[in-house]
Amino acid sequence: MRKLPPGFWLGLAVAAALAYPWLVNDYWVDVMNFCGIYMLLGLSLTIIVGYAGLFNLGHAAFYAVGAYTTAILSTRFGIPSLLLMPVSALAAAAFAYVISRPIIHLRGDYLCVVTIGFGEIMRIALINNPGGLTGGVNGIIGVPRPDLGLFTVRSVDQYYYFILFFIVLFVWGMGRLERSRIGRGWTCIREDETAAEAMGIDTAFLKLLAFVLGAAGAGLAGNIYATKMTLVAPEGFNFWESCVMFCIVVLGGTGSVPGVIVASVGMAALPELFREFARARMLVFGLAMVLMMIFRPQGLWPSAHWRRQVSGPAPDGEGVRQQDRVGGAGCWK
C-alpha cells in the first residue's frame, strides 16, 4: 500500500478540527476549549523543557501573571481584554526575566526545585491580596469577553475557533523557532550544556530567552482563560496545574509539538470520561507517568530528534543531514 504524504494527514487533521463543533454537542466543544488552553500551555512549556532542556515545575506562575494582568486591567480600568493579550504576554515575560535571571545558572533538580518555589510563592501572594489588587482567595470576577468589534466572543463554538487560531499561530511560530539559529542553540544546550559553552554558545542568554518566550506564551493562555471563565482565583494556578503542564510535555514527547497536542487532549478530556474515578485521578496520573518512563520514555509522539536517537541515521544519509540542521554536535552553524 502506497504511503500517503504528510500533507494529506495534515489536511485531514485541519478538516477534522474545523468540523469538530458540528459533530458534537456544546459540552464536548467546551471540553475541547479547555484542552486548547492546555495545548497553549503545553506548547509554551515545550520551549523551556522540550527545546532548551530546562526543568520548570512553576509554569503556573507565568499563567497566573497573564490571567491576573487581564483581570485587573480590564475590571479596574475598562481596557478591552483583547487589547490586553499582548500586555498579558509581556507582563508574564517580564516577570519571567526578573525571577529567572538570578537562577539561570542552576541545572537539573536544583532549577526544578526553585521553580516549584516560585509557583507556590505566586499562589500565596495572590491569596494575600497585595495592595487589594488580586481579591484574595475570592479572586476577581466580571472579566469581560474578547470584543472583536463586530461581535463578542461568547459562545463555546466561537471560543473554540478563537483558541484554535492561537494554537495554529503557536505551532507555526514554534516550527520557525525550532529551525532557527536560536532553536539549534537550545538543542545544543539540551544535549550537553558544557559542550555548548565550549562551542561559544551564550548559554545564559539562550536559557533566559527560553524562559521569557515560554512565559509569554503562558501569559497569553492566561488571558484567554480569564476571559473565558470571566473570573480568576488563586486555586486555578496551584502546583497541580504546573504538574499537569509538565506531564503534557513529558507524555507527549519532549520537544514534540504533535505530541503535546495529543497529550493535552488526553490529560484534559480523559478525566471528563472517568468522572466517577475523580478521587483517584492523581494516582492514575502518577501510575501513567511511571509506566511511560519504563515502557515509552520517548513519549506518545516522539520528536524527530528522539526517533533519530533510537533508530540512527537513515541509510541514504538524510538522517545525518537532518541532524546537522536541527540537532547534534554540528547544530550551531
Image (cartoon, helix red, strand yellow):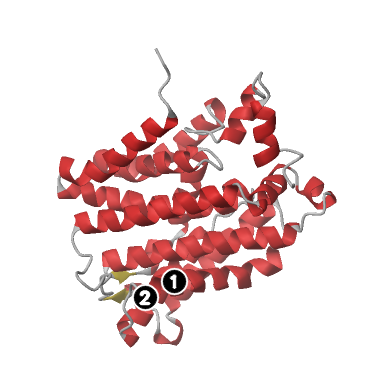
Helix, strand or loop under label 2: loop
Mark 1–mark 2 CB contact (< 8 Å): yes
Q: Position of residue 161 (x, y in %)?
A: 27, 54
Furthest residue toward top: 1
Residue 320 sits in quarter: top right
**Mark 2 surroundings within 10 Å by alpha-carbon count, few (fewer than 14), some (14 through 19), many (20 or more):** some
Left or right for 292, reference 190: left
Residue 139 sits in quarter: bottom left
Left or right for 161, reference 319: left
Q: CA distance from mark 1 to mark 2?
A: 7 Å
Q: Is residue 231 above or below residue 108?
A: below
Q: Is residue 292 above or below residue 109?
A: above
Q: Which residue is mark 1?
A: 86
Q: Which residue is mark 2?
A: 83
Residue depicted at 54% across the width and 69% down the height: 93
Left or right for 242, reference 324: left
Q: Is residue 238 above or below residue 289?
A: below
**Mark 1 surroundings within 10 Å by alpha-carbon count, few (fewer than 14), some (14 through 19), many (20 or more):** some
Residue depicted at 51% across the width and 31% down the height: 292
Residue depicted at 52% across the width and 63% down the height: 215
Amino acid type, residue under disc 2 in the picture = Leu
Amino acid type, residue under disc 1 in the picture = Pro
Q: Position of residue 331 (x, y in %)?
A: 72, 43
Q: Position of residue 55 (x, y in %)?
A: 61, 51
Helix, strand or loop under label 1: helix
Residue 105 makes an appearance in the image: no
Residue depicted at 56% across the width and 31% down the height: 297
